[in-house]
Amino acid sequence: MIYHGIRFTVKQGVSEKDLEAAFESLRNQGRVIPSVTSFVVGPDFGGEYEYGAVFVIGDLAGYEEYMNHPAHLNTDRVGLPLLDRFASFDVTDDPDPEVGAKIAEIHRKRYSEIPDIAELVSDLGEYTGSAAPGRHGD
């Protein structure tokens, strides 16, 4: 299993209407992407971010489907322009010692093949996560 998590802080001045549209797009990912087995979207407590989401995905093939699915790309396009700080992370019980590199490669390939998404991520005030374009991803 892979638990793909995101945490984020919204830019000053973002309207409730725009923020709710981004949240609804996140929830829609969980409902329509076949590889997502469960999800949660809501406030982030106990850290320095305002909101977060976690999507549970069965394997690397499902992770790649999730990252490139039109519903996820829509969320990127609707939501990323509203954000100041963003962090993504993955927790997995996959015993493959190369799973982290494989996850990072899925991100690198996605940013390479979908340049508008790479640009949106690069324009964030702060981004940490797998293969952040133009950054030191972890």
Image (tube, grey):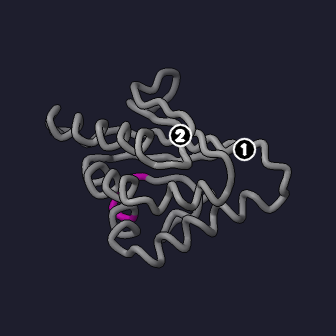
Q: Magenta stretch: dominant SS?
A: loop
Q: Residue at x 51, y 48 (%)?
A: 34
Q: Earlier in the sequence, mark 2 or mark 1?
A: 2
User: Is 101 in front, or is 73?
Assistant: 73
The Cα–Cα distance between marks 2 and 1, rounded to whole angstroms, is: 12 Å
Residue 92: image tag: 1
Which quadrant is the C terminus positioned in? bottom right
Q: Is residue 39 above or below residue 92?
A: above
What amino acid does circle 2 point to? Phe
Q: At which x and y percent is residue 133?
A: 48, 69
Q: Residue at x 40, y 27 (%)?
A: 42
Q: At which x and y percent is residue 109?
A: 54, 74
Count of residue discs: 2
Residue lying at the far top in this picture: please name it: 45
Q: At which x and y percent is residue 83?
A: 31, 47
Q: Give the image quarter of residue 1.
A: top right
User: Is 42 in front, or is 127?
Assistant: 42
Residue under label 2, please give it.
55
Q: Viewed as shown, does residue 18 lie left or right of 52?
A: left
Boundaries of the magenta span: 122-126
